[in-house]
Image (spheres, rainbow, N blue to C red):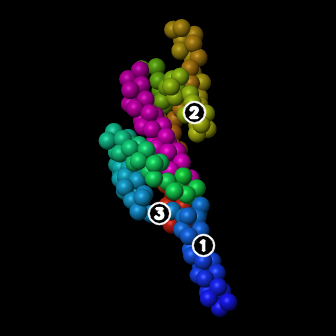
Amino acid sequence: MKQRHIVIFLLSVIMSFASGCGSDDHIDKGKFTELNRTTQDLKSVITSIKPCDVPDELLQRLASGITAAKGKAASKAERDLITAYSSLLTTYKDGLLLCRSRTHLSKFEFVPKGRIYVTQELDPLVEKYSLSTERHLYEPTGQLWKSIDGDSIKVIWENADAQSKNIENMVNYN
Protein backbone atom coordinates (compact mmCIF):
# COMPACT_ATOMS: atom_id res chain seq x y z
CA MET A 1 0.00 0.00 0.00
CA LYS A 2 2.83 2.36 0.87
CA GLN A 3 4.52 1.65 -2.46
CA ARG A 4 1.30 2.47 -4.28
CA HIS A 5 1.15 5.90 -2.57
CA ILE A 6 4.77 6.55 -3.46
CA VAL A 7 4.14 5.61 -7.10
CA ILE A 8 1.03 7.82 -7.24
CA PHE A 9 2.95 10.65 -5.62
CA LEU A 10 5.85 10.29 -8.06
CA LEU A 11 3.47 10.15 -11.01
CA SER A 12 1.69 13.32 -9.85
CA VAL A 13 5.03 15.11 -9.43
CA ILE A 14 6.10 14.05 -12.93
CA MET A 15 2.75 15.13 -14.40
CA SER A 16 2.94 18.49 -12.65
CA PHE A 17 6.46 19.04 -13.92
CA ALA A 18 5.58 17.98 -17.45
CA SER A 19 2.52 20.22 -17.62
CA GLY A 20 4.58 23.15 -16.36
CA CYS A 21 7.14 22.61 -19.12
CA GLY A 22 4.53 22.76 -21.84
CA SER A 23 2.77 25.73 -20.34
CA ASP A 24 1.14 28.17 -22.72
CA ASP A 25 2.79 31.01 -20.78
CA HIS A 26 6.37 29.84 -21.23
CA ILE A 27 8.80 31.57 -23.59
CA ASP A 28 12.11 29.93 -24.36
CA LYS A 29 14.30 33.05 -24.59
CA GLY A 30 16.96 31.13 -26.49
CA LYS A 31 14.66 30.76 -29.49
CA PHE A 32 14.37 34.53 -29.77
CA THR A 33 17.98 35.59 -29.24
CA GLU A 34 18.61 36.43 -32.91
CA LEU A 35 15.26 38.21 -33.29
CA ASN A 36 16.04 40.27 -30.20
CA ARG A 37 19.52 41.13 -31.51
CA THR A 38 18.11 42.21 -34.89
CA THR A 39 15.43 44.32 -33.20
CA GLN A 40 18.10 46.03 -31.10
CA ASP A 41 20.17 46.70 -34.24
CA LEU A 42 17.14 48.25 -35.94
CA LYS A 43 16.38 50.32 -32.87
CA SER A 44 19.97 51.61 -32.83
CA VAL A 45 19.78 52.73 -36.45
CA ILE A 46 16.42 54.43 -35.98
CA THR A 47 17.54 56.33 -32.89
CA SER A 48 20.72 57.43 -34.67
CA ILE A 49 21.30 60.67 -36.55
CA LYS A 50 19.96 59.10 -39.78
CA PRO A 51 16.83 57.13 -38.81
CA CYS A 52 15.76 56.72 -42.44
CA ASP A 53 18.95 54.92 -43.45
CA VAL A 54 17.93 51.47 -42.21
CA PRO A 55 19.78 48.85 -44.27
CA ASP A 56 17.41 46.55 -46.16
CA GLU A 57 19.36 43.55 -44.89
CA LEU A 58 18.30 44.34 -41.31
CA LEU A 59 14.64 44.19 -42.30
CA GLN A 60 15.30 40.99 -44.23
CA ARG A 61 17.07 39.51 -41.20
CA LEU A 62 14.07 40.32 -39.02
CA ALA A 63 11.63 38.85 -41.56
CA SER A 64 13.72 35.67 -41.90
CA GLY A 65 14.02 35.36 -38.13
CA ILE A 66 10.26 35.64 -37.73
CA THR A 67 9.69 32.95 -40.35
CA ALA A 68 12.21 30.64 -38.65
CA ALA A 69 10.70 31.24 -35.20
CA LYS A 70 7.19 30.41 -36.40
CA GLY A 71 8.24 26.82 -36.94
CA LYS A 72 9.72 26.57 -33.46
CA ALA A 73 6.93 28.15 -31.40
CA ALA A 74 5.84 25.67 -28.74
CA SER A 75 3.47 27.77 -26.65
CA LYS A 76 0.79 30.40 -27.00
CA ALA A 77 3.14 32.93 -25.41
CA GLU A 78 5.76 32.20 -28.06
CA ARG A 79 3.17 32.50 -30.85
CA ASP A 80 2.02 35.82 -29.36
CA LEU A 81 5.63 37.00 -29.27
CA ILE A 82 6.08 36.10 -32.94
CA THR A 83 2.92 38.06 -33.74
CA ALA A 84 4.37 41.05 -31.88
CA TYR A 85 7.62 40.79 -33.86
CA SER A 86 5.60 40.61 -37.10
CA SER A 87 3.69 43.73 -36.15
CA LEU A 88 6.96 45.49 -35.34
CA LEU A 89 8.36 44.53 -38.76
CA THR A 90 5.29 46.04 -40.42
CA THR A 91 5.76 49.25 -38.44
CA TYR A 92 9.42 49.48 -39.48
CA LYS A 93 8.40 48.98 -43.12
CA ASP A 94 5.74 51.70 -42.75
CA GLY A 95 8.33 54.09 -41.35
CA LEU A 96 10.76 53.41 -44.15
CA LEU A 97 8.03 53.88 -46.76
CA LEU A 98 7.32 57.29 -45.29
CA CYS A 99 11.05 58.10 -45.21
CA ARG A 100 11.47 57.18 -48.85
CA SER A 101 8.38 59.14 -49.85
CA ARG A 102 9.62 62.18 -47.98
CA THR A 103 12.89 62.07 -49.86
CA HIS A 104 11.45 61.14 -53.25
CA LEU A 105 8.57 63.62 -53.26
CA SER A 106 10.54 66.58 -51.90
CA LYS A 107 11.67 67.44 -55.44
CA PHE A 108 8.18 68.65 -56.40
CA GLU A 109 8.17 72.44 -56.12
CA PHE A 110 4.46 72.63 -55.30
CA VAL A 111 5.00 70.68 -52.04
CA PRO A 112 5.68 73.18 -49.24
CA LYS A 113 9.01 72.79 -47.49
CA GLY A 114 8.73 70.47 -44.49
CA ARG A 115 5.62 68.70 -45.84
CA ILE A 116 5.19 65.25 -47.38
CA TYR A 117 2.84 64.79 -50.32
CA VAL A 118 0.28 62.08 -49.46
CA THR A 119 0.14 59.62 -52.31
CA GLN A 120 -2.27 56.68 -52.55
CA GLU A 121 0.54 54.55 -51.17
CA LEU A 122 0.77 56.74 -48.05
CA ASP A 123 -3.00 57.08 -47.47
CA PRO A 124 -3.20 53.85 -45.41
CA LEU A 125 -0.34 55.06 -43.18
CA VAL A 126 -2.03 58.41 -42.61
CA GLU A 127 -5.13 56.57 -41.43
CA LYS A 128 -3.32 53.82 -39.49
CA TYR A 129 -1.19 56.25 -37.47
CA SER A 130 -3.79 59.07 -37.34
CA LEU A 131 -1.40 61.53 -38.98
CA SER A 132 -2.87 65.01 -39.37
CA THR A 133 -3.16 66.27 -42.91
CA GLU A 134 -3.41 69.61 -44.65
CA ARG A 135 -5.37 70.12 -47.84
CA HIS A 136 -3.82 72.02 -50.72
CA LEU A 137 -4.98 73.18 -54.13
CA TYR A 138 -2.78 72.56 -57.14
CA GLU A 139 -3.76 75.67 -59.05
CA PRO A 140 -2.74 74.65 -62.59
CA THR A 141 -5.26 71.78 -62.54
CA GLY A 142 -7.58 72.78 -59.71
CA GLN A 143 -6.93 69.41 -58.01
CA LEU A 144 -6.94 69.08 -54.24
CA TRP A 145 -4.17 67.13 -52.59
CA LYS A 146 -3.07 66.36 -49.03
CA SER A 147 0.19 66.62 -47.18
CA ILE A 148 1.48 65.61 -43.77
CA ASP A 149 4.17 67.18 -41.65
CA GLY A 150 7.69 66.05 -42.50
CA ASP A 151 8.17 65.05 -38.85
CA SER A 152 5.28 62.56 -39.05
CA ILE A 153 7.88 59.83 -39.25
CA LYS A 154 8.49 60.39 -35.53
CA VAL A 155 4.98 59.10 -34.82
CA ILE A 156 5.80 55.83 -36.54
CA TRP A 157 9.20 55.48 -34.87
CA GLU A 158 7.58 56.15 -31.46
CA ASN A 159 5.04 53.44 -32.26
CA ALA A 160 7.89 51.05 -33.12
CA ASP A 161 9.65 51.94 -29.86
CA ALA A 162 6.49 51.19 -27.86
CA GLN A 163 6.15 47.85 -29.65
CA SER A 164 9.81 47.02 -28.90
CA LYS A 165 9.24 47.74 -25.22
CA ASN A 166 6.15 45.54 -25.27
CA ILE A 167 8.21 42.71 -26.78
CA GLU A 168 10.89 43.15 -24.10
CA ASN A 169 8.18 42.95 -21.42
CA MET A 170 6.69 39.82 -23.00
CA VAL A 171 10.09 38.11 -22.94
CA ASN A 172 11.18 39.32 -19.50
CA TYR A 173 7.95 38.56 -17.65
CA ASN A 174 7.36 35.07 -18.98
Q: Is residue 107 above or below residue 11?
A: above
* Residue at 56% over, 53% down: 80
Q: Is residue 93 magenta?
A: yes
Q: Position of residue 169 (x, y in %)?
A: 53, 63
The front one of 99 and 14 is 14
Which residue is identified by label 1?
Answer: 15
Q: Are marks 3 and 2 in contact (CB under 8 Å)?
A: no
* Mark 3 vs 2, N-terminal side: 3
* Element class at badge 3: loop
* Mark 3 vs 1, N-terminal side: 1
Q: Amino acid at mark 2?
A: Val
Q: Position of residue 40 (x, y in %)?
A: 39, 56
Is any part of residue 87 visible from this angle?
Answer: yes
What span is in magenta?
A: 80-108
Which residue is identified by label 3?
Answer: 28
Q: Main secondary structure of the magenta part?
A: helix
* Element class at badge 1: helix
Q: Is residue 126 above or below residue 61?
A: above
Image quadrant where residue 92 sits? top left
* Residue at 59% over, 17% down: 144
> Marks 2 and 1, Cα distance to the nearest angstrom?
52 Å
